[in-house]
Image (cartoon, rainbow, N blue to C red):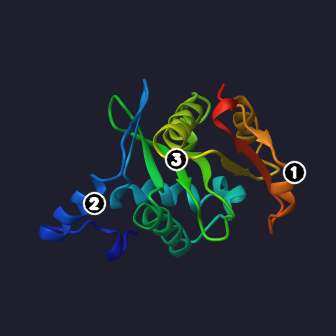
Amino acid sequence: MMHAWERPSTGAAAAQAGAMSDLVPVLGTERLVLRAPLIGDFQPYAGIFMSGRAAGLGGPFDREGAWNDFCEAVAGWMLRGMGLWTIIEREGGVVLGFGYLWQEYGDPEPEIGWVLTEAAEGKGYAREAAEAIRAHAFDTLGMATVVSYVDHDNGRSIALAERLGAVRDPGAEAAMADPVRVYRHRPEGRA
């Protein structure tokens, strides 16, 4: 059930929201577009974060928790100049998932992250999106390093972080409040 606060604004408020969305960088790959999240993207976001797919991401969440997580990720653009992208197919515009360059509450440093719909898994979309996000972090924002926080049981994301050339950082892992693998990306570590 969609709540009133999940519906897009209208009129001048919608125009203002659109103008703000236009400030989020659009990243492109051969098959994907990473664009600003729209309020309508909350439905697929909730579908992921309210399911077992969110087990390694602090979930699964109830609808309120998914909404709060979505809003925190979107707010990152205003507060930190980095946040959530909606990953869509270049041809057809289907929402495939979400990519992050953000620093959520409790994170000691900025993170590259990815989460896909079940239908989008296994097609190389996460790697394609992560490479675009990493390039943005290093080439556009001039970051020297970013990390990926990966649950110990998330074999697919562990394998992807390693294919991306990220290296486990035991010192960063020891500093984390929750047990998690920390994979460090550096510009020279690009695959």
Q: Whole-Å distance between the Cαs marked 2 and 1? A: 39 Å
Amino acid found under the numbered disc labelled 3: Gly
Location of residue 105 with respect to 184 vertically, above or below: below
Residues marked 2 and 3 touching at CB (< 8 Å): no
Closest to the observer: 9 or 13? 13
Q: In which quarter of the image is the C terminus?
A: top right
Q: Residue 31 location in percent, x, y?
A: 43, 26
Q: Which residue is drawn at 67% across and 30% down?
A: 188
Q: Where is residue 38 in the image (x, y as percent from the top left)?
A: 34, 56
Q: Which of marks 2 and 1 is nearer the N terminus?
A: 2
Identify the residue at image location x=46%, y=41%: 140
Mark 1 residue element: helix
Which residue type carries mark 2? Answer: Met
Circle 1 packing at 10 Å, graded few (<14), some (14-19), many (20+), is few
- Nearer-the-camera pick, 12 or 39: 12
Q: Distance between the residues labelled 2 and 3?
A: 19 Å
Q: Distance between the residues labelled 3 and 1?
A: 24 Å
- What is the crowding at mark 3: few (fewer than 14 residues within 10 Å), some, or many (at least 20)? many
